[in-house]
Image (spheres, helix red, strand yellow):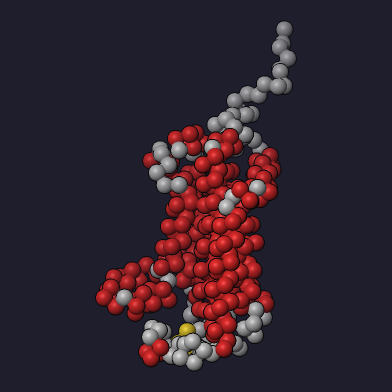
Amino acid sequence: MTQKKNQAVESPEEHSCRGSFSGNARNKLELIFTMVRRDISQIHRQGLPLLLLLSAILLTIGISFLVIANSGAGFGGELDITGQPWTVPSIGFGGGKSGIPFSSVTLLQVVYGYSVVVTMILIPAAFSLNYNSEVKKGTIRTLTCYPLGVFEITIAKLAYAAIVGFIFAAPVSMLPVLGLEKSVFDLFAVFATAYAFSLVIVAVGAFAANAITVATKKMYIQPPVLANLLVVFSFFTTSTILNLLGAALSFASPFFQAVGQLTPLSLYHQGRLLLTYVFGGSESPIWLVFLLPIALSVLGVWLTLKLWPDIYEKE
């Protein structure tokens, strides 16, 4: 006599608290969307006050700088960025008499640099606050009792950071620069480039941390930590920042020159070159460099799929 299968009992292949990947992709996607919606609806518990504070500080800095710049004051009376070409180095900082190490920069460097600072702070902050809150409360272990694994959880946290990061970073980046006599499309393109590269760096860091966990069998470095480290690395290896540091700390200039050998690996640096190329400048990015984050992401995703969610139980 054939026993009738009890529909209330699922086989280990159908359900597992160890995050079995047997569920079909559509169900997994729905669960990821559900997780993201839950996180957004509970944003007040995911560090909302800190995100608001950071946004207010960055917006104040951006507006103050642009107001001073548009007035042509505060930099030897020579800085006037309204209506300037994107890629022509005609924005003077007063040279040596103002004590600022740049004799001139482009408008693109000013606007893109501001967008980079905004996105490199707000996107990693959204990702870190959300991820760390889940770990601290222990609810990340509860999530693994659904048919979800480390890959799905990581994707959901990155999606949350992408949405929340955009909501906060877009107005903070765009509002101060709307008076520069440039089209909104151009200004948004500059912001979108900085936003995209910040998000890519955070994603690479998250999946690379998971890959390290697979190799070491223990989460020695959490995804938010490595993501923030990579963002800082990419920012401080740009040629603009290294030139500034080298001029301000002349005694350490040999060190900054040595670090400058890593500049081609900086996605923020390549992003500025990409925008220069798009806006008709003479520079262009090293296109092969863009293959590096793609390769790291693919490797990280592949290894993340091999990572059992019981790793959270050791945290």
Q: Position of residue 79 (x, y in %)?
A: 51, 89
In front: 119, or 69?
A: 69
Using the rendered view, name the quadrant where residue 65 is placed.
bottom right
In front: 129, or 222?
A: 129
Q: Residue at x 34, y 78 (%)?
A: 248
Q: Residue at x 41, y 39 (%)?
A: 218
Q: Position of residue 37 (x, y in %)?
A: 68, 48
In the image, 188: left or right of 111? right
In front: 158, or 39?
A: 39
Using the rendered view, name the quadrant where residue 13 is placed.
top right
In front: 287, or 165?
A: 165
Q: Position of residue 262 (x, y in %)?
A: 37, 67
In the image, 170: left or right of 277? right
Specify the quadrant that holds the C terminus: top left
Q: Position of residue 72 (x, y in %)?
A: 54, 90
Q: Residue at x 58, y 71 (%)?
A: 59
Specify the quadrant that holds the N terminus: top right
Q: Residue at x 56, y 78 (%)?
A: 64
Relative height, residue 258 to residue 99 (above, below): above
In the image, 93: left or right of 145? left
In the image, 102: left or right of 88? left
Q: Look at the image and tell me whether residue 180 can be seen.
A: yes
